[in-house]
Image: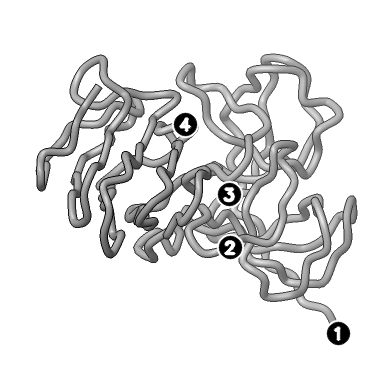
Amino acid sequence: MASFATPNVILNLATGTDLSTKQYKALALGTDGAVDVAGANVSIIGILQNSPTLGKSAEIASLGGGSKAIAGGTITANDMLKTDANGDLVTANPGDVYAAIAIEDAVDNDVFQVLVLQATSTAATPQELTATGTVTPGIQSVELNHATVAIASTLAAAINSPGFLMVKDTSASGTAAHTFTMTAGTVDGSNNVLTFNAPNEAVLMYIDSAGNGTIIENVGGVAIS
């Protein structure tokens, strides 16, 4: 017999847009205090239970309780889940922001049962880049590793990666100019690019809730621009 977790319901938050066709989508809280459909791999406040129009109260299944949700792909019971760009839930990977855990199997577009989680991740697991690529939101340790080819790494939205972040050149040798670029957010004022020219150069920074980084330690003279 299937078992279902009881929702922990929030009733006093208004919608920032028309959500009348968004039942069972994951929701994020905006800076204006209103809720809207969550983007990809972000912290959520919960999952929409009703179908409110603009400015009306959303009924939200929140942290620690159960909910129905919409699958954005094939899911197996006990999978850790994250949001996709449509506010649906998909299987998460190490370093992703976990939003829920699957209580049952599902395939794309199924409505299925989940347990809504406190936003967590395996962010302590280093993400190693050996070629140009994107940094997973929420990751706290980035390693740039290639002796001869410059790696261009990018963090698309630093606002989704608050807290401490270490970026290090872990190449065995070489002077390739590896870069770390915050495409939305800044480092120490108006800068947004770190350039690593030698093995073991590293930067430890703190990213605040607005997505702006302050460098705490610069090892080896990493260039900031």
Q: Secondary structure at mark 4?
A: loop
**Distance between mark 3 and mark 1 Cα atoms:** 25 Å
Q: Position of residue 41 (x, y in %)?
A: 58, 45
**Distance between mark 4 and mark 1 Cα atoms:** 43 Å
Q: Position of residue 150 (x, y in %)?
A: 40, 43
Which amino acid, mark 4?
A: Ala
Q: Earlier in the sequence, mark 3 or mark 4?
A: 3
Q: Position of residue 58 (x, y in %)?
A: 68, 31
**Distance between mark 2 and mark 4 Cα atoms:** 18 Å
Label 2 Cα crowd, 10 Å radius (few <14 / some 14-19 / many 20+): some
| Figure check: 137 above or below 130 | above
Q: Nearest the camera: 212 or 47?
A: 212
Q: Which mark is residue 157?
A: 4
* Image quadrant assignment for residue 116: bottom right
Q: Earlier in the sequence, mark 2 or mark 1?
A: 1
Q: Quadrant of the C terminus?
A: top left
Q: From the image, state whether disc 3 or disc 4 is nearer to you.
A: 4
Q: Which residue is mark 3?
A: 62
Q: Residue at x 57, y 28 (%)?
A: 13
Q: Which mark is residue 93?
A: 2
* Image quadrant assignment for residue 78: bottom right
Mark 3 touching mark 1, by CB under 8 A? no
Q: Secondary structure at mark 2?
A: loop
* Image quadrant assignment for residue 107: bottom right
Label 1 Cα crowd, 10 Å radius (few <14 / some 14-19 / many 20+): few
Label 4 Cα crowd, 10 Å radius (few <14 / some 14-19 / many 20+): some
